[in-house]
Amino acid sequence: MSSPDETNAALQSRRRILLGLTMAPLAAALPLAATATHKPGDGATAESGAGYKPNFFKDVEWTCMVAICDRLIPSDDVGPGAVETGVPEFLDRHMQTPYANGAIWYMQGPFLEAPPEFGYQGRLTLRDIIRVGLNAIDAHCRKTFDGKTFAQLEHTRQEELLKAAESGKLKLEDISSKLFFTNILNEVKNGYFADPRYGGNRGMAAWKMIGYPGMRADYLDWITVRDKPYPLPPVDLSGKRG
Amino acid sequence: MATVKPKVDAVIVGMGWTGAILAKELTEAGLHVVALERGADRDTQPDFAYPKVVDELEGSVHRRFLQSLNQETVTIRHNSSSDAVPYRQMGSFKPGTGVGGAGTHWSGCHFRPLPEDMYLRTNMEHRYGKAFIPADMTIQDFPVSYDDLEPHLDMFERVCGTSGKAGVINGVLQEGGNPFEGSRTKEYPLGPNPNYLGAEQFYKGAKEMGWHPYPIPTSNASGPYVNPYGCQMGPCNACGFCSDYGCLNYSKASPNVSILPALRIKPNFELRANSQVLKVNLDSTGKKATGVTYLDAQGREVEQPADIVLLCAFQLFNVHLMLVSGIGKAYDPVTQTGTIGRNYSYQNLNRTVMFFDKSVQANPFIGIGGAGVTMDDLNGNQLDNGKLGFVGGGLVWARQPGAGPVRGINVPAGTPNWGTDWKRAAADNFRHSFYFEVQGACMSYRQNYLSLDPTYKDSFGRPLLRMTFDWQDNEIKASQFLVGQALQMGRTLNPLSILGDAKKDGEHYNITKYQSTHTCGGATMGSDPSTSALNRYLQSWDVPNVFAIGANAFPQNNGYNPTGLVGGLAYWAATAIREKYLKDPGPMVQA
């Protein structure tokens, strides 16, 4: 049994070899394919995204969303990226749940403006925040960058835009850029780290990167062990071992 | 027209800890009891079964074990001159719903109050003079003493199979326990749980600071256990899914595990889940409750007449029911009259996080709900409040209820929230950091209170409960002092870096960030009907066949988690009902 540290090290060295491939412009691989980090021999993550057809997102929204995923959690020497691990599929499926439609939020008006300490007070549900935000980002890009969409911009330009959205400095027509950014970042992280059954975290790759044993849920024998890393690889809700 | 059910001896609103305790005690006394629970019926099997329950997306994002805010929530504002807005998404506190209530998704910390917590105002005035207490601070003594409650606190620990180490038994100090605790009559039912790394390190740091560390008493079983009701618990396997989750292993005490198996079989007990109580019905005098009206699972209005009405909902909703039903007079902060909604308080929760190199195996995914280590050196009479300039103390503790990446990964200060640098920090720190929390008391104030919202309604057409609450200088000062002490202790452990989130001067209450589900007060117990809603038996002064059992009764909150005291008060009230009230129904204390 290899330790998570050893597993990570092996993955990382393999990734370093493949790093050159990840520099291809992402837009070339859209809308359905993921990044070009197809790792031979890694069946779970290879061809990720390909073959999944979005139901919630329209093609232009999907393209924009995939590009954002790729910048928020890029494929790099630390570990796999959001796109190759299926986060776009996670988002598309998650947007169709009652949760994303406001099932556990209080959604009655009036909708008043309030200081940030009182949280989101708007009328849009999560899935509308994401959809409206994606379209607003693309509209802003087309206007500002000679008709180019977000996905068609250079990575550095995309990152500048996302930073401006994170701080709220980016002015969008239909939505607060900060509100959109906070929600999509949350969703991308949820998809990256949630159980693979939800579409992301393929091959439990995100869990392996951080050394999370997943759903083992039994550590009685390891509470007081201090001198070595936890030895077992992750297990997911379906019982698969990573 | 509502369907009218046959009259019963007692109707209980809410099947969490206090509802289950009262139902058990009163059915034992021979009463016919009907319990109405707004949420679904739930049990370990199948609702908390492995592996379905250990799903972070379902548990901590979709919050399937917590109350949905869609139908019922509260509105919140910082002061009475602003408009309140709804608590639309779950953040600062997490009420439960369904059979077991918040008692299914708690962590398991199971403290008793200190004796001096029970007479806080008298104690502060005695130690520092009347002028020491700020004019707007409305703290009061509990109308019961620690000694009154001791047998009932003990009973609740026995029912929960609490794991811990006594510090004082019958006045005699015990090695390894809390030397400052009130004297107890017995040792804990089970010994302490094993220490994870952060707890072990806390012992080291506490020694440096000259503190007296002891195992947090916790209702996560350290071994097999059978409680006085014959309910069985299995040893906790440290799965790391406690807070937000139901227990998969019969290890965390809950109404479902610890009481309901013995209650469900009683012929004089009936549990009706999916039954949303809308109001308590009063007779024409307004001094007597006739029962409750609720919506059944099909949305039909049903009236359940009863001789006794026991409000056992979550603290906020007990207060809400009293306000919408017209039980007692609503509190008015301007005239300082009325009692329902008065003295709302909370908990002053802060955190320090320590980051280490990769040789330090903190394994935060390992978790035993409430287990860990704490100390009382900065709590109760150990603290010189006069010198420090604030009322109330608190705890610093090492606890590890279990972490997973969807629930969040702690990263050092200055780390971006996304991109390669964030990934690297997440990968480097997830398994190599732990945290110490600072849990402070929260005083009550003239200006922090609960009332009905004039604008927003719930799905049943009732006004939402409105919370008017903000941090006051006293709590901000306490936060800064306690976090400062925790940081000082943390630094003795030589972490690579350390984070601390003490409240800043003038900081406002932020409802978006989870802090604590320890909302308290609003229908408090007291010895004066002009400043309390309930007498010392948690009986309404105004409508004596109504009892409101829960943290709503706390005149202010102390530094501990409230569940131990809530359970103790429930047994105390149940005993009074059995031994006094049933023999002579009416006010048990003359106003």
Image: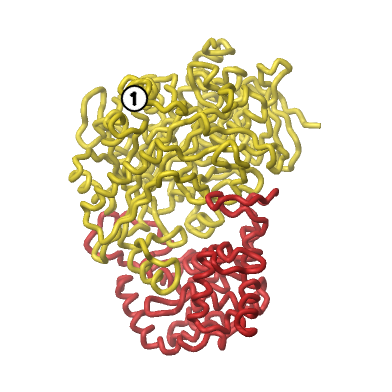
Please, is residue B173 above or below residue B421 in the view? above
B540 or A122: nearer the eye? A122
Query: For the point 45% across and 58% down, which residue is it?
Result: B407
Mark 1 residue type: Pro
Where is residue A214 drawn, in percent x and y? 42, 64
Q: Label 1: state its secondary structure.
A: helix
Q: Residue at x 52, y 87 (%)?
A: A25
Mark 1 surroundings: few (<14), some (14-19) or many (≥20) residues within 10 A: some
Query: Which residue sits furthest right?
Result: B1
Answer with left or right where residue B542 lies relative to residue B390.
Answer: right
Q: Colour of chain A?
A: red
State the hue of chain B: yellow
Does residue B483 sit above or below A200 in this rendering? Answer: above
Instruction: Inspect this view and state whether residue A93 appears.
Output: yes
Is residue B337 toward the left or the right of residue B133 in the image?
right
Point out the image quarter for the C terminus of chain B.
top right
Q: What's the residue at 32%, 41% (across, down)?
A: B481
At 33% from the left and 80% from the top, the residue drawn is A10
Q: Would residue B290 be found to the left or right of residue A17 on screen?
A: right
Location of mark 1 (residue): B115
